Amino acid sequence: MILSFCLRALDRLPEARREAERARAHPDPERRAAGEVAFGAIAMAEQRWVEAAAAFGRASTLARLADAPRVDGIAEANLALAALGAGDPEAARTAVQRARERLTLAADRYHLARLTHIEGERLRQAGALDDAEAHLRAAWAEAEATGDVDFALAAREGLVELALARDDAPRASAHLAELAARSDGSDDPRWPARMAALRVRVADRLGGTRTLSMGAQARVVHLDGVALDFSRRGPLRRVLLALVAARGRGLGVAELLAAGWPGERPSPRSGQARVYMAVRRLRSLGLDGVLLTHDDGYHLATHLEVEVSGCEAM
């Protein structure tokens, strides 16, 4: 069952489904309940909300038979997520209430913290934006305190969505930059796609020309007024400075490798991987949508205004 969750996080869904099916066939009802939770999580990843809800409902029933309140609470929390995915905040409200009762009984602080985030998402979907913001901020603080990196990121993602719902694009951009700065801590391969989708939406709301400003060494970069700290990212700084210096033309892998890692001579395959990863990291830190790939190589978008000052704070 644990292997199923790990495989799902790696987006290896067919393998994850096989492991979940094995757990669902276990003679112990608590193990079967956990298998149903794993099976439902896979269905949610595929946005099959009705199938996911059915699996979580079965998990809750089995967990109650096994007198396993923690598993029952986790099943109900996931049921709330499935309801939100299906656009049913009222069903989510009931599931959150049941989950809180069971997780409190199990003294499961970790998953209770996750419930704060789910309740915040429910309130946002229901249109109670002020209450939603309070819950999402609390969820972020609680997730940070418990070391739950992915739910801390999800809470910050919810704040981006909340700012968009309020048509406050500058605040959405600020939350997005904070989200990007913290996404290094997650090993979930789905985050880059989620971040990219958010960036497109925020950029659309901002409209017009985007601005990138930096000192001569790019230790601190400001994108649309939001600070990004590059002080400990030497290769990324050098790659970015090379892209800025080459405005109007593309840079190939060899040029970016020489800029980012001067004097080093890795194998062609290793060098290419370094450049690809550097470009990916720059995009995930906020440059997605303005760091483009064309036939002539990588370059910064023409609608990006770049301001370079002669000095910068250390």
Image (cartoon, grey):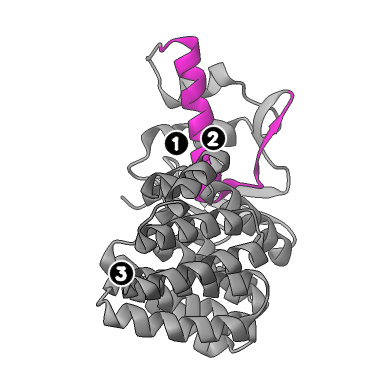
Q: Which disc, if any, is residue 110?
A: 3
Neighbor class of circle 1 (other Cα within 10 Å; few <14, some 14-19, many 20+) is: many
- Which percent across, then down, holds residue 186? 40, 50
- Which percent across, then down, holds residue 237? 44, 37
Q: Are marks 2 and 3 in contact (CB under 8 Å)?
A: no
Say above or below: 166 vs 51.
below
Q: Is residue 240 left or right of residue 126?
A: left
- The residue labelled by disc 1 is 236
Residue positioned most to the front? 27
Magenta: predominant secondary structure element?
helix
Residue in the picture at 46% in, 25% down: 274
Can residue 290 be found in the magenta stretch?
A: yes
Instruction: Give the amino acid at mark 1.
Output: Leu
Neighbor class of circle 3 (other Cα within 10 Å; few <14, some 14-19, many 20+) is: some
Neighbor class of circle 2 (other Cα within 10 Å; few <14, some 14-19, many 20+) is: many
Dot 2 or dot 3, earlier in sequence: 3
The span from disc 1 to disc 2 (Cα, nearest Å) is 8 Å
For the magenta stretch, what is the residue range? 266-295
The span from disc 1 to disc 3 (Cα, nearest Å) is 35 Å
Q: Which disc, if any, is residue 225?
A: none
In this rendered view, identify the residue nearer to me: 172 or 231. 172
In this rendered view, identify the residue nearer to me: 255 or 149. 149
- The residue labelled by disc 2 is 279
Q: Is residue 274 left or right of residue 166?
A: left
Dot 1 or dot 2, earlier in sequence: 1
Residue in the picture at 53% in, 86% down: 94
Instruction: Give the amino acid at mark 3.
Output: Tyr
Q: Secondary structure at mark 1?
A: helix
Can residue 117 be seen from the camera position used here?
A: yes
